[in-house]
């Protein structure tokens, strides 16, 4: 029989909400700055901000989805409006979108009335870090391929997607090995 | 074990699909790049989530406890594979309090290692309650898929009510020939010393008081009082339970009856029970040690059963009410059938005391002047009913506050006997 400590769910939820607000605000600010602060971009940014605040306050699945979609829409509108070549911040923007969703999910899980072992939180964080790193790397790779093949048409874009898939397989193997190593370490302990 | 995907998976894949489609349609690589982390997270989560194989056992550490005791339920989990996110929940009946918020736990399971989750619950309400229905939810990596199952290992846990501390109680007016704690007025064989008198033919030699005999130069013997016990029948009105949950009239009655059962059985009296309501239950008088458990078990299962059927004490089987038994009736004095039964018992010559268990002071009036007026009329009606009962010789005591039953009983000088009625 093992006895493991538990984390204060309220504190975890507070930290996760704070992280979500910071990441969401940074994503919205990046999109607005990329668009050059026109009124239409500000409208998108305002709507995304409202959705972000609503999602942080309510933590409902549909508000989280709405906030993520509106932030992505703000960025997409800014990219279309800027039209100044590839945005080098796109992988970071994608990573921010993922982290925003994950942090809001963390806050929702931590806010429920239950005790969670520290080991569970540790494994969630390890998985999140691995996936974030893999996602950012894959996005960066896709951006590099797209940049190198710019102007050659959508065929090369598909090739970039294939490269991204290869990266994904590598990430999967990395995550599996990470989880296996973690279990082995626990058994040894 | 049922499997399902979470809204999170739909959110990620939906958003990623929309971004990839828009990127391909508009020829913007940034959109595809934006979708990459979401796709990676979704695929990684699904690929690393494996179908769990789980063995679950549920054990409750005690079958009987008192109100306020902590009952610990242990849920033992053994998994064939590593499971990083296993939520374990226990269905908590309303009679138990989960103050520590421990009834839902999220644990990590190592393959082949037995993991025990202990869930302490405080028993807050008497009764017989099933405990042991556990639910397990296994969340896959990334929280994208869940497997759920329920494990029913319920068994009844009996929570005995907190006892009213009774020092003296009511002294029954009639006693029986069995040995008990009451000292009879007559002076014959017994233990309690009465007086010394001159020897008479037939006195036993062992009763001779040699000191007095030597001093008075004449044989004297000691005389003792015999010890007697009494028959007590607790009469519970179970036609209704009036009041807030946990503070209802039936709950108060059960609490008081439990205290009286232990008090009288400790004094070697014979105690019986009659639960008179929609469902009639009875336990004949006995003084065995197991009688405490028999009566308390019956009290735990006491419930108010709604019924329109007209009932009277003729339904009680022979032997339930022994001659000369003292009846202590707990009733909220709301249902006419119960008050009629009480009057009937009194008319048959049983020494009887009624304890009114309806907390009138806790009944709030409706809003407005009419509500206040209605409450006053209702209080007058109840006072009239009590006065009617007292007028025919039935003492009515009012009690509902914990810890005050003994004081309430002491307020009655003695239980009226048949001789009192004749006067």
Image (cartoon, rainbow, N blue to C red):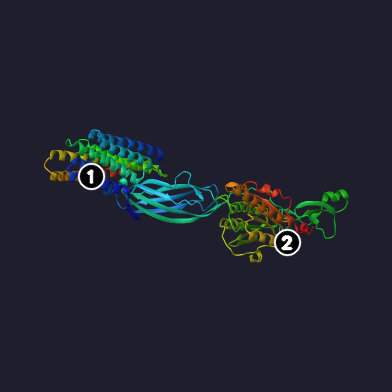
Q: Are marks 2 and 1 on the same chain?
A: yes
B372 or B344, nearer to the observer: B372
In percent of width and height, residue A108 lies at 37, 43
- The C terminus of chain B: image quadrant: bottom right
Tell which subunit mark 1 falls on: B
In percent of width and height, residue B104 lies at 42, 47
Tell which subunit mark 2 falls on: B
In percent of width and height, residue A120 lies at 35, 43
Distance from disc 2 to disc 1, alpha carbons, whole Å, reads 90 Å
- Label 1: element kind: helix
A83 w.r.t. B149: above or below: above
In percent of width and height, residue B399 lies at 65, 49
Q: Residue furthest left?
A: A152
- The N terminus of chain B: image quadrant: bottom left
B234 w.r.t. B410: above or below: below
Q: Contact, CB < 8 Å: mark 2 with mark 1?
A: no
Tag 1 residue: B19
Q: Residue furthest right?
A: B217
- Label 2: element kind: loop
**Nearer the N terminus, badge 2 or badge 1?**
1
A131 or B77, nearer to the observer: A131
Q: Is residue A57 left or right of residue A180?
A: right
Is residue A38 at least partly visible in the picture? Answer: yes
Label annotation for residue B362: none
Q: How many labels were placed on the picture? A: 2
Tag 2 residue: B349
Q: Is residue B6 left or right of residue A165?
A: right
């Amino acid at each position: 029989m093992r006895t493991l400590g538990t984390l204060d769910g309220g504190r975890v939820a507070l930290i996760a909400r704070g992280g979500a607000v910071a990441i969401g605000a940074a994503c919205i600010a990046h999109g607005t700055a990329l668009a050059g602060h026109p009124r239409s971009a500000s409208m998108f940014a305002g709507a995304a901000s409202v959705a972000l605040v609503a999602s942080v306050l309510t933590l409902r699945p549909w508000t989280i989805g709405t906030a993520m979609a509106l932030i992505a829409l703000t960025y997409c509108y800014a990219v279309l409006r800027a039209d100044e070549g590839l945005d080098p911040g796109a992988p970071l923007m994608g990573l921010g979108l993922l982290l925003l969703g994950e942090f809001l999910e963390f806050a929702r899980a931590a806010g429920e009335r239950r005790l969670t072992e520290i080991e569970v939180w540790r494994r969630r964080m390890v998985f999140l870090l691995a996936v974030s790193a893999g996602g950012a790397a894959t996005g960066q790779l896709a951006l590099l391929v797209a940049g190198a093949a710019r102007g050659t048409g959508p065929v090369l874009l598909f090739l970039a997607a294939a490269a991204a898939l290869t990266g994904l397989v590598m990430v999967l193997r990395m995550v599996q090995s990470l989880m296996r190593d973690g279990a082995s370490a626990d058994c040894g302990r | 074990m049922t499997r399902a995907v979470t809204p999170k998976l739909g959110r990620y894949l939906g958003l990623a699909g929309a971004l990839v489609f828009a990127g391909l349609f508009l020829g913007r690589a940034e959109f595809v790049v934006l979708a990459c982390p979401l796709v990676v997270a979704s695929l990684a989560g699904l690929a690393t989530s494996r179908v769990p194989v789980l063995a679950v056992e549920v054990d409750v550490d005690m079958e009987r406890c008192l109100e306020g005791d902590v009952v610990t339920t242990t849920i033992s989990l053994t998994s064939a594979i590593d499971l990083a996110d296993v939520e374990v929940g226990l269905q908590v009946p309303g009679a138990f309090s989960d103050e520590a918020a421990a009834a839902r736990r999220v644990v990590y399971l190592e393959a082949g290692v037995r993991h025990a989750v202990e869930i302490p619950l405080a028993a807050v309400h008497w009764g017989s309650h099933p405990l042991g229905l556990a639910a397990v939810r296994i969340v896959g990596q990334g929280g994208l898929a869940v497997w759920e199952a329920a494990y029913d290992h319920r068994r009844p846990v009996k929570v005995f009510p907190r006892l009213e501390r009774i020092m003296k109680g009511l002294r029954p007016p009639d006693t029986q020939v069995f040995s008990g704690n009451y000292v009879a007025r007559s002076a014959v064989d017994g233990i309690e010393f009465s007086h010394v008198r001159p020897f008479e033919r037939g006195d036993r030699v062992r009763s001779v008081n040699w000191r007095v005999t030597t001093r008075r130069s004449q044989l004297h013997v000691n005389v003792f009082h015999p010890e007697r016990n009494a028959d007590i029948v607790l009469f519970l009105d179970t036609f209704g339970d009036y009041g807030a949950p946990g503070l209802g009239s039936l709950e108060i009655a059960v609490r008081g009856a439990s205290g009286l059962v232990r008090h009288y059985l400790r004094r070697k009296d014979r105690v019986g029970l009659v639960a008179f309501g929609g469902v009639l239950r009875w336990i004949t008088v006995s003084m065995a040690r197991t009688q405490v458990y028999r009566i308390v078990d019956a009290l735990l299962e006491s419930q108010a059963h709604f019924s329109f059927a007209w009932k009277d004490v003729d339904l009680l089987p022979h032997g339930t009410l022994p001659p000369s038994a003292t009846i202590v009736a707990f009733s909220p004095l709301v249902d006419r059938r119960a008050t009629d039964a009480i009057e009937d018992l009194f008319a048959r010559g049983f020494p009887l005391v009624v304890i009114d268990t309806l907390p009138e002071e806790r009944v709030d009036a409706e809003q407005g002047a009419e509500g206040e007026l209605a409450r006053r009329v209702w209080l007058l009606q109840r006072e009239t009913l009590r006065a009617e009962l007292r007028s025919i010789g039935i003492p009515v005591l009012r009690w509902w506050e914990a810890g005050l039953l003994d004081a309430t009983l002491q307020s009655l000088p003695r239980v009226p006997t048949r001789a009192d009625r004749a006067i």
